[in-house]
Image (spheres, helix red, strand yellow):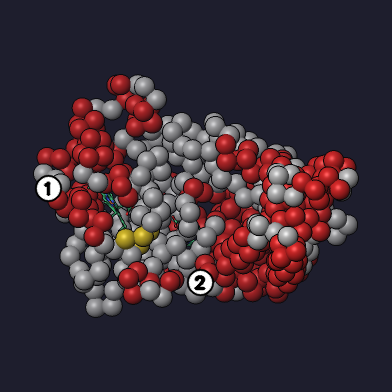
Amino acid sequence: MLQKTLSRWLVCLVAVAFLTGCPKPATERGQKPAAHTTGPATAEAAPSATQPAAPSTTEQAAQPSEAQPAEQPSQAAPSEEAAKPEAQQPAPAPTQQEAMPAPETTPPAAESQPAQPAAQQESAEKPKGEVSSQPAEKPADPQPAGAQSAAPQGTPYEVKVPLGLPPLPIPEDNPMTVEKIELGKMLYFDKRVSADGSVSCATCHDPNMAWAEHTPTSKGIHGQVGTRNAPTVINAAYATSQFWDGRAKTLEEQALGPVANPIEMGHTIEGMVQSLDGIPQYKELFQKVFGTGVTPENFAKAIAAFERTVLSGNSPYDRYRAGDENALTEAQKRGLKVFEESGCADCHTPPLFSSYEFYNAGVGMNKEKPDEGRKAVTGKDEDFGKFRVPSLREVANTAPYFHDGSAATLEEAVAVMAAGGIDNPHRSEEFDTVREAKITPEQQKDLVEFLKALSGEYPKIEPPQLP
Ligand code: HEC
Ligand code: HEC
């Protein structure tokens, strides 16, 4: 018994060292230190492991006031999670619980933060995609921000997820509001985000080209050409990582990348912020939406919120799945069967038609200096030439294909895939299933027909009026 108490204290001490605020309840939590260590650890690992320079520098440099509220929720989460079990399981330490005026101390604690678990559950469970944003805003405000910068709420925006798509994940610290999305849309189309005012996000992710671009690789500022094909922004909101190599974790993290990329928009983050901040209407809009001037974080948040409205579903495939037998042609039905039975669906997993895992398909591996792909992010040799499985929704509208844009047509891309990729020392063995299925030329045609059935409805919008 004595030993137990001692070890509990020890655990608490350790916990104190990790977390600033190991609350008293930790004494009762002796047996659950995992919640402490894993919580903060992952919270820290996430940003650093993914995007190199952009987010970390901006967090420190530009926006100390914003950095705090952003961090707080993630800290609140573990301690709160930990607080829950204790409220729910009086079992481990009944005597202590009884000794304390438990019913009075725990409820307030639980009540002060119920917004967060509720919000999490809601966005995780809500069926038809009306993931509402208001509850998510709450946890960010009451605690940390307090007097400093209580961000204005704005008009909550309910995302209407099209038929066939799962509920949309929305980060707690970036709830969707009408005003924020409007602002994000302006920024997305504004060429003043680039160093010489020649390139906007829409240049390479053009709504009229299914939010992608019909060139193998993109031309950025001063006509410089990159090495990778611009993926569509459609449904990027669902991806568990961003970029072909997954080097950014979220849309928020991604959005600053192109700004400072020398051959994309060629700007510096500070320069971009300065020039936008010099435009009175932007200043006003940022103030209205975030309660701050133009900041890198809020630039990214606004664009990400806008991108989360760019979804495609309600395709013939989705209608077929929903029970409309006539939504697919006979060829498409045959193609669907091949797709499912020969292993395509293992990687291009419905409903988003991507598992968002990384594989080496052998594309571009015969170049003199092949693109390292995922290896550049993880440093692991086994990740050489691996790229994130692209979603196949709207794929018929986003030619050319592959990370280097080397397949001009859908037929070509399917032929490469049907062969189980292209041989090279790093080809992923997961392609063997497809290879062994020995897909015939006829079946390839059916596959192509089937992929056309993944084109549905997505927003086709005109550039907004800019400030
Ligand atoms: C010069 C062309 C160009 C510009 C300008 C550009 N992008 Fe991109 N974008 C690309 C390319 C190329 C990639 C893939 C790069 C990679 O994987 O390394 C990409 C990747 C992305 C992705 C990841 C999609 C996915 O499925 O992984 C998103 C989201 C995105 N861009 C949004 C934006 C936003 C927002 C802006 C404006 C702030 C922007 N892009 C500006 C070319 C561009
Ligand atoms: C082992 C996982 C895996 C399997 C199995 C697989 N794919 Fe892929 N697919 C990928 C990856 C990874 C890429 C991107 C490769 C690259 O760009 O280097 C890709 C790219 C594609 C593309 C190009 C999409 C674009 O936007 O560039 C199409 C089309 C495609 N696959 C269709 C199929 C079909 C059809 C099958 C079944 C015959 C299939 N894939 C099987 C992983 C897989």
Q: Nearer the viewer, residue 68 or 26?
A: 26
**x 31%, y 68%: residue:** 385
Element at label 1: loop
- Is residue 166 left or right of 5 when viewed as pictured? left
- Is residue 426 left or right of 298 when viewed as pictured? left
> Looking at the image, is mark 2 or mark 1 earlier in the sequence?
2
Q: Is residue 162 above or below residue 152?
A: above
Label 2 beta carbon less than 8 Å to ligand 1: yes
Residue 184 image position (x, y, % from top left): 62, 51
- Is residue 106 left or right of 35 when viewed as pictured? right
Label 1 beta carbon less than 8 Å to ligand 2: no
Number of numbered tags placed on the structure image = 2
Residue at label 1? Answer: 438
Residue at label 2? Answer: 261
Residue 400 image position (x, y, % from top left): 30, 55
**x 26%, y 39%: residue:** 340
